[in-house]
Amino acid sequence: MANSRGGFTNKIGFIAAAAGSAVGLGNIWKFPYETGANGGAAFLLIYLCCAFLIGFPVMMAEIALGRKTGLNPYGAYASEGNKRWALAGLFGVISGFMILTFYNVVAGWAFGYFLQISFGDLLSAENFGAFFGGYVADYTDNMIYSILFMIVTAIIVARGVSKGIEMAAKVLMPTLIFLLILLIIYALTLDNALDGIRFYLVPDFSEINGKTVYSAMGQAFFSLSLGMGALITYGSYVSKNDNIVNSAVIVTLADTMIAFMAGMLIFPLVFSQGMEPSAGPGLVFVALPGIFQSMGPVIGKVIGGAFFLLLCFAALTSTISLLEVPVAYLVDEKKWNRKRSVAILAGSIFLCSLPCLLSQGAVEFFTDFMHYEGSSKSFLDLVADLFSEIGLPLGGCLLTLFIAVKWKTSQLSAEIAIGYPSYQGSTLEKYVNIMITFICPVILGVMFITTLLQKFFNVALF
C-alpha cells in the first residue's frame, strides 16, 4: 500500500515533514501572544510539560495507527475499526480541509506583510492597528497573496510524498531555524532585552491558575498538529523499520524548540520598546511593526522583512500537511490520482476560504457573522473556533478512545515494537498505555467541553 501511494525515503525525511506539520503559525504567532497573556515563564513551563506528557503519547498513537494501516485517517479508522469509527477519521479529514480555509488567509497576510515591509511603505504608517485593520479589509491584494500561497502549497503536494513534501520540508525547516537564530542574535543585542528574557525564563508561580493550565494544554495540542489526522497520514508513509518512539521524541523536541526560540525572539523585541507582552493576537501584526519601525528605515526593513518571511516559511510547512490529509483521502478512498486530487481540493479550499477573506471588514455580513462569547464574531473566527479550538481536542479525544476501546493498546504496542523491539514491557510502554487509556481521553474531553461551553454558551470554567 505504502509503495503505491509513495512514501518518505528515510527517517530524516519523515521527521522533517512531521516537524514541519507541527511547526507553523501556532509556534511563531500564537505561542508568543499566549505566553505573554498568561504570565510568561510559568506558561512556558506548563506548555512544555503538556507537550511531552500529553502530546507525545498521542503523537506516537497517531503515527502508529497510520503506519499500521498505510491509509488516510478515514481509511485507518475503517480498517482497524468499523464504519462508525471511520466517522472520526472523516471528521479529521474535514477538519484539515476547513482549517486550511482560514489558515491560508492568515498565511497570505504574512506574505503581504513581508512584501509591504521589504518593498513597500508599511513601516512609515502612523498607526499600525489602523493599518492592519485597513490591510485585512482590502480583499484585492490579500486574495492574490492567498492564491499564491495556495498555488505553492498545491505544487509541492502534487509532486508527491518524497519529491514534494519531503524535499520541501528538508529545505524549509533548516531555513526557518537559520532565520530564527539570526533574528534572536540581533534581538539579544537590544536595550532591555534581558528584561524580556527574564519575563520569559524566570517563572512567577503566582501566575499559575486554571486558565494558565487550560491555555497551555490547548497550545501544546494545537502546536503539535494533533487531532486532525495529519500525523496519521504522514505515519502511513513511514517505513516499518523506523523507530516511532525516537521519531516522535525528535518531532516533539523540534516543535517545542521552534516555539521556545520564537519566544526568545519576540520578548526581547517587545521589552526593548517598553511594550506590554500581553498584546494578544495583534502582537505580531500590530505591535512588532512598531518595533521594526523604531529600528530605522534600513535595519527595520531587513529585520522586519526577515521576520515575516520566517512566518511565511512556518505557515507553508503546515499548509502542506493540511492539504495532504484530504488529498490522501481522495487517493485512498476514491482512487483518484494525486494531481487531480490536489487540483480539485486546492480550488475548493480557496473558494471556501473566500468568506474568511471577506470577513475582516470587506463584507459586513461575513464580518459580523455571529455573536457569541460575549462579542461579535467574523466568519473566520467561527471556522477557527469550530475546527481548531474545539475540533482538535475532540479529534484527539476520539483517537484515544478508539485505541483504548476498539484497537486496544496491545496492538498499539505491537506496532511501535516493530521498529523498537525493547518497547514492549518497558516503563515507557506502561506510561503510554495509561495515558492513552485513562488520562488523555479525560483531559482532551474536558478541553473539548470547556472550550465548547466557553465559546458558544458563555460559560467560563477558568
Image (cartoon, rainbow, N blue to C red):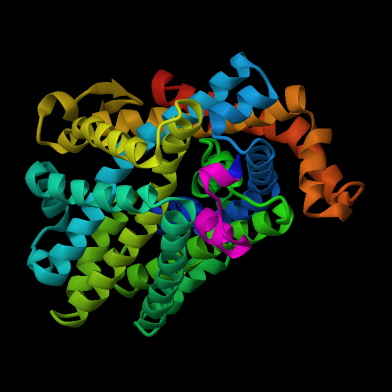
Q: Where, by quadrant of the figure, is residue 189 drawn?
A: bottom left
**Quarter of the picture holding the N terminus:** top right
* Residue 172 falls in image quadrant: bottom left
- Is 7 in the magenta? yes
Residue 91, percent from left and from top: 49, 25
Q: Residue at x 48, y 22 (%)?
A: 453
Q: Nearer the viewer, residue 280 or 1?
A: 1
Q: Is residue 205 visible?
A: no
Residue ID at (51%, 46%): 219
Q: Residue at x 50, y 52 (%)?
A: 22
**Front in this rendered view, residue 355 or 39:** 355
The magenta-colored residue range is: 3-19
- Image vertical order of residue 28 relative to residue 183, above or below: above
Name the residue furthest front. Answer: 4
x then y, percent, for residue 248:
66, 54
Question: Closest to the observer: 87 or 137?
Answer: 87
The number of discs equals: 0
**Residue 339: horizontal and vertical position, in percent?**
34, 42
Q: Position of residue 385 (x, y in %)?
A: 39, 31
Q: Is residue 266 magenta?
A: no
Residue 449 lies, with reference to residue 198, above or below; the image says above
Looking at this rendering, what residue extends furthest in the bottom direction?
189
Q: Residue furthest top?
A: 84
Q: Main secondary structure of the magenta part?
A: helix
> Does any portion of residue 243 appear in the rendered image?
yes
